[in-house]
Amino acid sequence: MSSGLNIVLAIFIPWAMGFVALSFLFPRDELTIAARFALAFVVGTGLLTFLMLIWSLAGGSFSGIGLGVFISSITVICAASVLRYQHTLFKTTPPLIHDAQASHPGVATRTEFLWELLDIFIVIFLIFHCVYIFWRAFHIPVYGFDPLKINALNAKIFFFKKNIVLPLDPVYRGYPLHVSLLQTWLAINIGQWHDQVVKFFAPLYFAAYLVIQYEFVKFFMNIRKALWSLGLLLASNLFALHASLAYMDFPLMVYNCVTIMILLLWQSEREDRFLYLAAILAGMGTFVKREGTAYLFIYGILFVLMLLKDKNRNYSRLRAGMKFFLPCIILALIFPVFQWVHHTDSEGVLLDFSWQNLHRGPIILKQFFMDFFLSGNWNLVWPVLILRLFFTPASESHPLFKWLIMAVGLFAGLLFLLFLLSNAFFWIAERDTTLSRLILHFFPLATIAIVLSPGPQSGTGKAE
Amino acid sequence: MNSCHIKDSICHFTKLGFFFIFGILFVVFSPFFWQPASLMVRFIDTFSRISPNHCQYGQIYGVNILGYVYGGIFVFSFSVAFWKSRRGGMFKKSVGGMLHVMTLGMVLVICFFQVKFQIRQFAYEYKYFKGSDVMGKYQEIYKDSFGFARYCQANILGHKKALIKSDLDLEKGEGFFRKTELAYFLYPIDILGKYYDDPEVIIVYRKKNPWRALPAGFVAFPPYDRESLVAVREEAP
């Protein structure tokens, strides 16, 4: 019983931290309740692991109640500040008034009935997957090479040594510690190492991501399209499988895709708070897996392209650039500083810019083709996206469609260059253990792009 | 965006598409209503090669199952588009619409088979792990390494610096995987440090004549099996 309460508390504390952080950025009702709750978990877990790293950097130990008091007191102090800030804000500014969309009851046609039937199928499909994923995540302990070697072993060592001790093996020493520290946090809170409980955060990322994508698509399209995008997401074998495992790829996928979504929201709404949130999430992604750092280039390119589309003066662009790049670079530097302080040298990807590497091109392209179109990972989501791209007239496309396609193209291009110009080529030429997991990091963007097109409205009449 | 506009443009295709999808679903489902034919079970098995690194569909006569799916989509879509163009429709527009509807339809069909497989997997995992605690589950997943780690932990308590000896190459291949599993399960008995000079514990794992691997001054516990045992430094009197 007390162990159950401890687990709930271990999950509640980071969630509350995220909620408080979001309340600073979004003091009014700019986010829906569901989106706020889901984003709070994603932001909160990211903050928690950074604070644990800083605590360890400052010489703090994971034993006793020191860490708990540190984390809780920061949360409480920030919550008090938020309350005060919001109180002032409510007194000085009038409440936000939304233009309520009139509800038009759907016309009961035979086609509408078929669409509703499809919606029901998708809801059943989603419920089945949620039950299956939560059951697997809560009943099967940590297993598999990467989760054991890279995350759980680290976390177990941190838990028993009461501190962050980087692995001796130089190959694994440079891996970011987000997932390991989350597992350590759960173990600290329940007071013992439990191989099953330490992976409880995995399905919560899944649930949070589903809500965020649903709310995002609903904001730009309608409820039905939002539902379809989730259906396409769970139609993928690999996505559904990873949602119940303790790999680093799923959390990185969440941070990566939510960063892109928030950037797109900024592109559409031009509110600085979205820029800050995107920057924070991008920075947090660098602490989940090494690829997160490489993805900063993609966010940077997308953001600069968005700025160039802007008709503002150069000064405003520069200011916007600072608002995005500064927070994300500061967050991205925390772990390298930690490594530098601990004199840690690690073996990472080695770049090699020789012309001879060009012969790798056809092999990489072949593997890409096999993975995108002939594997059992993604159902037929990529072919559907290709059809959407070539057969839907530009005039009928949603303005965000081109940005999503550009993001997907940049991710694929980055992977291609990575395999072409580095020793990572081994992992695509000799092994099939890496590419699919890398594609998973941006796969959900394809499901969003597919539904951003003209199609049937929601029967509830809540179309935007 | 308005539903009438959409209705005009895709109404024909949706009707056709739905008939096609329900036709396929009927053909696919029907064997389950009376007998799970072995052919169908084998077909579902083509969806079973899932791994966290890469999921693969099976092959039929040496061709990836998605090859047949793409073939079916193309042949059907182009045939319908050709037929419609002869009746005055625009070929390109018809092909695009049909390819869309057909591919989305096949997404549903593949989903059905995946769910069918997942239900079977769910039932299997439930039965496999039912009533087991974490130890029991690990015993099922990592039979050899977990059992040996439990044996070591039953004999040696707390933080210890350990040296592992084995006939397996512990730096690559199977030996590397076994060492990783042991490192995780054994901790806080630490086999990851380079304790060649002053180990407190010697772990002999899958090595012929394990007693010969023990240096002087170490006393062995009753062995785990003929090739594995654990020994601890003999305390000075």
Image (tube, coloured by chain):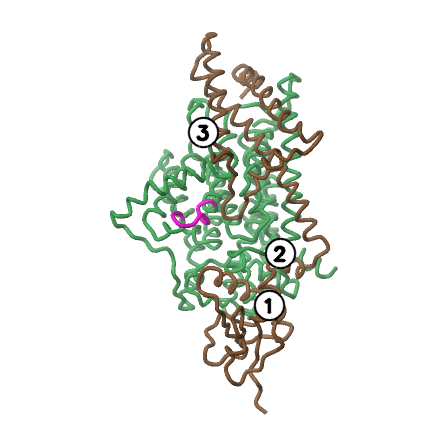
Chain colours: A green, B brown
Marks 2,1: beta carbons within 8 A = no
Distance from disc 3 to disc 1, alpha carbons, whole Å, reads 57 Å
Camera-side residue: B183 or B59?
B59
Badge 2: chain ID? A
Disc number for residue A141: 2
Residue A426 showing in the rendered view: yes
- Chain part drawn in magenta: A428-436
Residue A203 image point, x, y percent:
61, 48
The residue at the point 68 percent across, 51 percent down is B128
Residue A316 showing in the rendered view: no
The residue at the point 56 percent across, 58 percent down is A182
Q: Amino acid at mark 1?
A: Ala
In the image, are marks 3 and 2 on the same chain? yes
Q: Which is closer to the viewer, label 3 or label 2?
A: 2
Distance from disc 2 to disc 1, alpha carbons, whole Å, reads 16 Å
Dot placed on the residue nearer the N-terminal end, 3 or 2: 2
Camera-side residue: A71 or B6?
B6
Q: Which residue is mark 1?
A: B149
Looking at the image, which residue sits at the far bottom? B237
Q: Secondary structure at mark 3?
A: loop
Q: Amino acid at mark 2?
A: Pro
Q: Residues within 10 Å of mark 3 (few under 14, many from 20)?
A: some
Q: Is residue A434 magenta?
A: yes
Task: Say if B44 sits above or below A189 in the image.
Answer: above
Q: Quadrant of the C terminus of chain A?
A: top right
Q: How many marks?
A: 3
Task: Say if A238 sits above or below A382 in the image.
Answer: below
Q: Secondary structure at mark 2?
A: loop
Looking at the image, which residue sits at the far top? B87
Q: Which residue is mark 3?
A: A399
Badge 1: chain ID? B
